[in-house]
Image (tube, grey):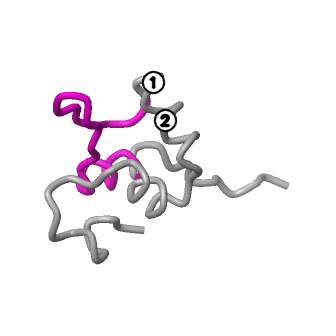
Amino acid sequence: MKIANTDFSGKLLINGPVAAKVLGLPERTLFTLRKRDNIPFAQIGRSIRYCPQELDTWIDENSLIPSPSMN
């Protein structure tokens, strides 16, 4: 799924609830990933925002491709 190709692509940055929704994650999981520095984010003052293009890259880099099982 490419987040940058959704209706949110016109925005430079998206907030946490929107990022969690498009990632299909609970907001708490997104918060945990951010606190562990496992997902890219930008902090502007006290505001946390996510770049859709960086989230696309993060998905690609963290996706597992199953290998064919050997029988």
Q: What residue type is labelled 2?
A: Phe
- Residue 52 in the image: state x and y as whole percent: 27, 56
Vertical arrangement, residue 60 with respect to residue 4, above or below: above
In the image, farthest residue toward the top = 36
> Would residue 49 be counted in the magenta stretch?
yes
Give the label on residue 31, or none: 2
> Would residue 44 be counted in the magenta stretch?
yes
Residue 41 location, quadrant: top left
Quadrant containing the N terminus is: bottom left
Q: Which of 21 and 66 is in front in this view?
A: 21
The residue beneath circle 1 is 35
Describe residue 15's horizontal placement relative to residue 29 as left or right.
left
Residue 10 location, quadrant: bottom left
Describe residue 23's horizontal placement relative to residue 9 as left or right.
right
Q: In the structure shown, which secondary structural element does the residue marked by tag 2 occupy?
A: helix
Q: Nearer the viewer, residue 65 or 30?
A: 30
Q: Kindly identify the residue that appears in the image at 39 percent across and 36 percent down.
A: 39
User: Contact, CB < 8 Å: mark 2 with mark 1?
Assistant: yes
- Residue 60 in the image: state x and y as whole percent: 39, 52
The span picked out in magenta is 38-59
- Residue 18 in the image: state x and y as whole percent: 39, 59
